[in-house]
Structure formats: structure tokens, C-alpha cells
Image (cartoon, rainbow, N blue to C red):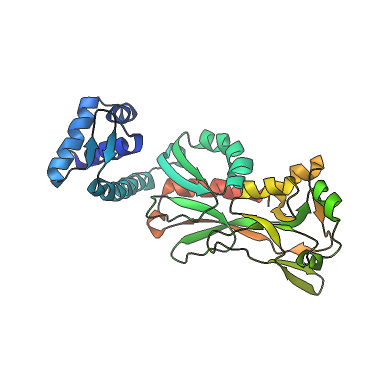
Amino acid sequence: MDRFDAMRAFTCVVDTGSFTKAAETLHISRATATQLVQQLEKRLQVRLLDRTTRKVGVTGAGSAFYERAVRLLADLDDAENSVTASQETLGGRLRLDVPSPLARLVLLPALPAFFARHPDIQIDMRVSDRTSDLLDENIDGVIRGGPMADPTLIARRLGDLRLQTYAAPDYLQRLGSPQHPRELEGPEHRIVGYLWAHRNQQAPYLMRRQQEALGIRGHYALAVDDGNAYLAAALAGLGIVWLPDYMARPHVAAGSLIRLFPDWQLDPMPLHAAFPPSRRNNARLRAFIDWAAELIAGIS
């Protein structure tokens, strides 16, 4: 038994939930996939999978082994790719976690260009604004806005996103247009709150004009933890928001958002790619980060 072939078969069965689908993915027969997993269980002297007539489930021991096997196979792929002469031949799976607005508005529309450059890379992209445990969840890398909260990760700054203050015309018709940021701290106005994942609470927005500097929190009726929901709440007239230019630009052009306080500036939001030290030599991840940095340079 080739242990790596057996581990690939086992992890593929877990990923697909089926021996048949795993065999199709690996281009082997179902009987071969079954035999490889059985040999692996015999070698380890533990049952890795629960098999029924309807589905295949992973046991507790199988789940623990799966996490280690996936990392080991990824490291093997990285070792092979590290000696590849050209990036054009990079291949294999890349597991990413990216913010939902950045995925929807920037990354996904541009991905055909990345795949044209690296056609053999397969991306599993989880789209969310929550904090991920990269090791426990077997994620190769994340892209996140704001300060990096985890000092154990290696971070590369992709760029800085310009922020501005916006509101929907409906909101301004109902509650009036504030003339100074301090008005947002009063009872007359409402903001839409954004719950940062690493602290699950709002952070003040620092606004500057010449020598003036204000940290604005405001009062909200609604707070969300997802960028797309944050934008949707603003468009619905639920409150005043602070948005990166790339999210607001099409809505300003359409007249569905209006910029406020044009003589005030906000500190830009840093955008980072981050990954655990074990992924330092992942050639697929490096290729994606290099491409993303080029892309972000065009919107920041």
C-alpha cells in the first residue's frame, strides 16, 4: 500500500462524502478507492469511516486523522511545487477565506485572469467576514481588512482601502443631512453598526479635518457582521455608513448613495493576506497573493 495514495483516497472520500465520487475525482475505480481506505484502516488499526447504505460518515478518530492528513498532503504538494521550474505549471488545491464584498465585487469577476495564468490550481473559496482558525479549519490563507489581530500569522499588506461616509437619499430626506460628524453622536441620527469579527463589537471611526480629529461611534438600530449586509442596510436607508470606495462607487454613480462630509478624511483601512507559518512555502498561495496584490492596487 502506498500511504500517500491511501491518504488521498481517504481525504477525498471525506471531502466528497462518497466512495464513488472520490473515485471519479481521483480517476480510479470505486473498488480501488475502497481498498485503499480499508488498507489504511488496517494499518492504523482504527475505523476511520462509518459506512451505511445511504452515506459515508467520518468517525472521531477519522476526523482527527483527516486534519493531519490534509496538511501532510498539502505539504507534499508544496514540496513538489517548490522545485517546479515555472509557476505556469502550478497545480493543486488552494483553500482560502475572503471577505464577502471583496469576493463579490473584486476577486470573483477577475478570477478568469488568474485561472488563465494558473489553469491547474483548484480554489476552495470560503466567503465570509468572520474570523477563521486557519489550522483547525485547514485554510491556507485569508484576506482581511483592518489590523491583523493574530500575531501568530504571517501577514502581507495588499494595500489600503480609502473610506468615506455615505447615506441613502431616503435616509437624508427623513432625518436631514448632517453638516458635521459630531451630529452623528446625537439622538437625531442613526448609523449602521459593523461588528468586527475579532472583537464582536463596533470600533470608532477616526475622522480628520486639518487639526481636528474625532472618533465617531454613533447610535445604531442595526449592527451586522457582513460587508454585503452592511451595504444593503445603507441602501435601505437604515443609517449612515463608512464604506471603501470600491463598494460605494457604483451606488454613488447611480444616485443611491450620497457622500457626506467631503472635507473630512478617514484613516484608510489596511488590507492583508495572512497565512500560518506552515504555508510559507506554498507556491499556489504565493501565486494567488501576488495576483491579488496586483488587483488591489487597481482599486485602492
Residue 295 seen by the camera: no
- Kindly give the residue lying farthest to the bottom in the view shown: 211
Residue at x 60%, y 38% (from the top left corner):
110
| Front residue of 248 and 235 | 235
| Position of residue 66 in the picture relative to residue 160 (left or right) | left
Residue at horizontal 13%, vertical 41%?
A: 42
In the visual, does 47 lie left or right of 129? Answer: left
Residue at left 57%, top 64%? Answer: 147
Q: How many marks?
A: 0
Is 159 placed left or right of 47 in the picture?
A: right
Query: Residue 56 at what x, y percent from top left?
Result: 27, 34
Classify 147 as above or below 243: below
Residue 174 lies, with reference to residue 50, above or below; the image says below
Q: Is residue 104 visible?
A: yes
165 w.r.t. 90: above or below: below
Residue 66: give x, y in percent of width and height: 29, 46
- Location of residue 278 by image quarter: bottom left
The residue shown at (72%, 49%) is 234
Residue 51 image position (x, y, % from top left): 23, 34
Instruction: Choose top left, top right, bottom left or bottom right for residue 268.
Output: bottom right
Quarter of the N terminus within the rendering:
top left
Q: Looking at the image, is 284 positioned above or below residue 154?
A: above
Q: Quadrant of residue 165?
A: bottom right
Q: Nearer the viewer, residue 128 or 80?
A: 128
